[in-house]
Image (spheres, rainbow, N blue to C red):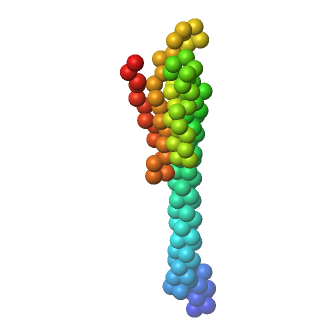
């Protein structure tokens, strides 16, 4: 074998240099960090959207319940007293008969008060003794 033939075989089997490997590792690390940042940004946005959705769902549930009770408002004494006791910017108080049936001769009302306290809708229920 000649010297030239040996040099050709060596160059063909040489592989990557240390500089090429270091550049490849740095580029792979940059790519991995970009993917990592993107993934956690997406996960954070998903958590935020889920909490917004849950808050909206809770709000809908509270308003639906309050609307149902407003529709069930009834006078406690055959029309002498109005069903709505008081209304303000942060609360409403009324007489409600949740077990009202169309065939019932006499309603069985109790007071219900909805108030906004510290940004939350709070329901206060109590039965009146007659």
**What residue is rendered at 45% in x and 52% in y?**
118
**What residue is rendered at 57% in x and 8% in y?**
103
Name the quadrant of the C terminus.
top left
Residue 107 in the image: above or below residue 90? above
List the single residue furthest toward the bottom.
3
Whether residue 110 is visible, yes or no, is: yes
Q: Nearer the viewer, residue 73 or 53?
A: 73
Tell me where residue 37 appears, x and y as whole percent. Answer: 54, 67
Tell me where residue 123 appears, x and y as whole percent. Answer: 46, 37
Name the quadrant of the N terminus.
bottom right
Tell me where residue 47 appears, x and y as whole percent. Answer: 52, 54
List the single residue furthest toward the front.
80
Residue 125 in the image: above or below residue 17? above
Using residue 129 as the reference point, say whether residue 88 is left or right of it.
right
- Image mark count: 0
Residue 1 in the image: above or below residue 41? below
Quadrant of the rendered image containing residue 61? top right
Q: Nearer the viewer, residue 2 or 54?
A: 54
């Amino acid at each position: 074998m000649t010297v030239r033939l040996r040099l050709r075989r060596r160059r063909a089997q040489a592989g990557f240099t240390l500089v090429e490997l270091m550049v490849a590792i740095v580029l792979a690390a940059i790519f991995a960090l970009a993917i990592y940042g993107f993934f956690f940004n997406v996960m954070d946005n998903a958590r935020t959207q889920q909490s917004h959705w849950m808050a909206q769902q809770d709000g809908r549930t509270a308003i639906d319940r309050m609307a149902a009770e407003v529709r069930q408002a009834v006078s406690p004494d055959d029309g002498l007293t109005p069903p709505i006791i008081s209304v303000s910017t942060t609360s409403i108080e009324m007489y409600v008969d949740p077990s009202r049936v169309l065939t019932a001769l006499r309603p069985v009302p109790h007071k219900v008060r909805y108030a906004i306290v510290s940004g939350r809708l709070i329901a206060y229920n109590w039965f009146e003794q007659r």
